[in-house]
Amino acid sequence: MNIKLREAEAVLNKLRFQPLGRKHHAIMGFFYQGKLLFKTRISRGRGELPGRVADRFRTQLKLNQEQLRSAIQCPFRYEDYINVLTEKGIIH
């Protein structure tokens, strides 16, 4: 599954990831109740995240392919993301 960089950025914004730093890559962190739970990074620029990089991105977000597709296409919201993380036992 390839993902366009702008789609990846839109998903991170939708899921309320916060910027942690900027160098060659944008580093984004997911905070829940004031605690940093995990982080991910994406390249700045244009183009796509190729298959393996896109899979790592999806894994870092703790989503399966269907959930990531849904987040890209818009029906998947922040509240849905919180439900997924709760079901996986990542948050309580």
Image: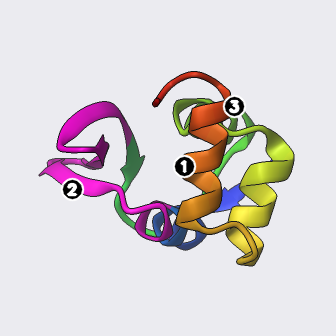
Viewer-side residue, 84 vs 62 = 84
Q: Amino acid at mark 1?
A: Ile
Q: Amino acid at mark 2?
A: Pro
Residue 26 makes an appearance in the image: yes
**Any mark on residue 20, and which?**
none
Magenta extent: 12-40
Residue 81: x %, y % from top left: 59, 52
Q: Nearer the viewer, mark 2 or mark 3?
A: 2
CA separation, marks 2 and 3?
23 Å
Label 1 sits on residue? 82
Q: Tag 3 or tag 2, which sits nearer the N-term?
A: 2
Residue 37: x %, y % from top left: 33, 30
Viewer-side residue, 67 vs 25 = 67
CA separation, marks 3 and 1?
25 Å
Label 3 sits on residue? 52
Name the image quarter holding residue 36.
top left
Label 2 sits on residue? 19
Residue 47: x %, y % from top left: 57, 66
- Whether residues under marks 3 and 1 lie with C-beta atoms below 8 angstroms apart, the answer is no
